[in-house]
Amino acid sequence: MLPSRLFFDNFFDDIDSSKELDKMMKCDIFEKDGNYTIEMDVPGFKKEDIKMELSNGYLTITAERNSEDHDDESKKYLRRERKSYAKEMRQFYVGEIDETDIKAQFNDGILKISFPKEQEEKDTKKIINID
């Protein structure tokens, strides 16, 4: 017996739309040469669409675009995903670093952010001998 969903399935539906993580800006975070680096996929966005903000030790990356093209009025879309308003955001705790230490590059849909590791406070305790 075949499930009825097979025959009455909507061709234009997503296979599994419950995966919100698939829609997020995916990233890799690694440590190299005393720096932390975040490499983030931001496909479909331009450099001007991306904003970064550092507040209370949290680095927030927001990518936002708005469809401003003038479409042909004769088109009747059945499904539209490519040309639409989109906003994605990720936030990372980076510690109390200076914003001038953060370096960012955007190339071919990949945002690369690099910043120094937080320096651990060295133990300033000294032993004093008693004579």
Image (spheres, rainbow, N blue to C red):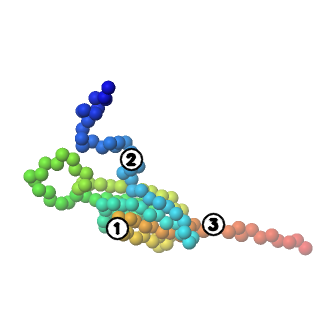
* 29 left or right, relative to 110: right
Task: Residue 10: give x, y in percent of width and height.
Answer: 24, 38
Q: Report the residue marked by disc 1.
A: 108
Label 2, label 3: how many angstroms apart (C-alpha)?
36 Å
Q: Amino acid at mark 2?
A: Glu
Q: Is residue 54 visible?
A: no
For the point 56% across and 72% down, which residue is it? 33
Which image quadrant for residue 31?
A: bottom right
For the point 13% across and 48% down, which residue is it? 76
Is disc 3 placed on a helix, strand or loop?
A: loop
Q: Residues within 10 Å of mark 2 (few under 14, many from 20)?
A: few
Q: Nearer the viewer, residue 56 or 58?
A: 58
Q: Nearer the viewer, residue 25 or 118?
A: 25
Of label 1 and label 2, which has the lower sequence position? 2
For the point 47% across and 60% down, which residue is it? 28
Q: Nearer the viewer, residue 23 or 115?
A: 23
Q: Residue furthest top?
A: 1
Task: Residue 91: give x, y in percent of width and height.
Answer: 45, 57
Q: Residue furthest right?
A: 131
Of label 3 and label 1, which has the lower sequence position? 1
Looking at the rendered image, the disc whose residue lies closer to the viewer, 2 or 3, is: 2
Q: Residues within 10 Å of mark 3 (few under 14, many from 20)?
A: few
Is disc 1 placed on a helix, strand or loop?
A: loop
Q: Report the residue marked by disc 3.
A: 120
Q: Amino acid at mark 1?
A: Asp
Q: Report the residue marked by disc 2.
A: 20
